[in-house]
Image (spheres, rainbow, N blue to C red):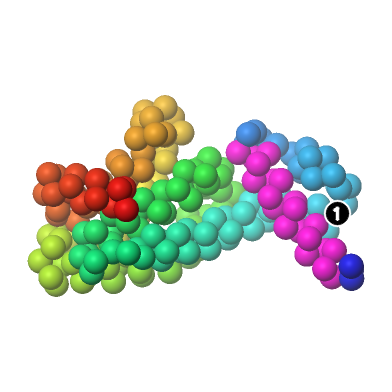
Amino acid sequence: MTSSVRADANRRRILDVALTELLHDPDASMDQIARAAGVVRRTVYGHFPSRDILIAALADNAAAALIEARSTGRDGAEGDAADELARATLAAWEIADRYRLLVALAQRSITVEGIRQRLAPVRQDLTDLLQRGLDEGVFSSPLPVAALAYVHEQAMFGLMDAVNDGALPPEEAAAAAAHTALTTAGVPPARAAAVIANAMRA
């Protein structure tokens, strides 16, 4: 194994272990992460010079996983914007649920602007989908579509906080996220429930 391959493997292992440790203990130190990863502290700092940089790298991974989940989640949708939004939200929530404690932690270490930048591709994809639904009359909102996309984004953060604080049971959160996304886009609650049930069966 070459030194560069070994370094890449160490970096991936540190990130994987750091995610597990931070989700278990948001105050986990770099020393704890190094011990859990089976490497010396110097190795961790060689890849991530500070705890904030490590958390930022985890946030990058979370954003990339979220983008992929939203894309693959829409596979199988039959062209209906409401169905696509429900499927994309349900798929994204699986990732969000895994990373929700990390998101709360990242908000302490990364600026709001930094988080927004990481989510820009997700927001653009959502904006495009919302615009299509508005054009087709599937969605309805008095807000400009770009503003509506921000409302959706912040609603998901709010739901993550609700789960973290015990206000929403985790097992209900995915459906709640999809229902919130659809009704915020102007889909009547009864139709939203039917669309979500169909998406969850699929």
| Residue type indicated by callout 1 | Thr
**Residue 95, horizontal then vertical, whole percent:** 48, 50
Mark 1: which secondary structure?
helix
Residue closer to the observer: 74 or 110: 74
Q: Residues within 10 Å of mark 1 (few under 14, many from 20)?
A: some
Residue closer to the observer: 138 or 78: 78
Left or right, 193 with respect to 174, comes to: left
From the image, tell me which residue sits under label 1.
43
Tell me which corner region of the image, top left, top right, bottom left or bottom right, holds residue 70. Answer: bottom left
Tell me which corner region of the image, top left, top right, bottom left or bottom right, holds residue 175. Answer: top left
Residue 12 falls inside the magenta stretch: yes
Q: Which residues are magenta?
A: 4-23
Left or right, 2 with respect to 91, comes to: right
Residue closer to the observer: 155 or 114: 155
Which residue is painted at 71% across and 46% down in the image?
A: 17
Which residue is painted at 14% across and 72% down in the image?
A: 135
**Residue 24, horizontal then vertical, whole percent:** 63, 34
Is residue 52 visible to us here?
no
**Residue 143, horizontal then vertical, whole percent:** 17, 61
Left or right, 105 with respect to 183, comes to: right
Which residue is painted at 88% across and 52% down in the image?
A: 42
Residue 160 falls inside the magenta stretch: no
Tell me which corner region of the image, top left, top right, bottom left or bottom right, holds residue 84. Answer: bottom left
Is residue 138 visible to us here?
yes
**Residue 178, horizontal then vertical, whole percent:** 29, 48
Can you name the residue that lies furthest to the front here?
202
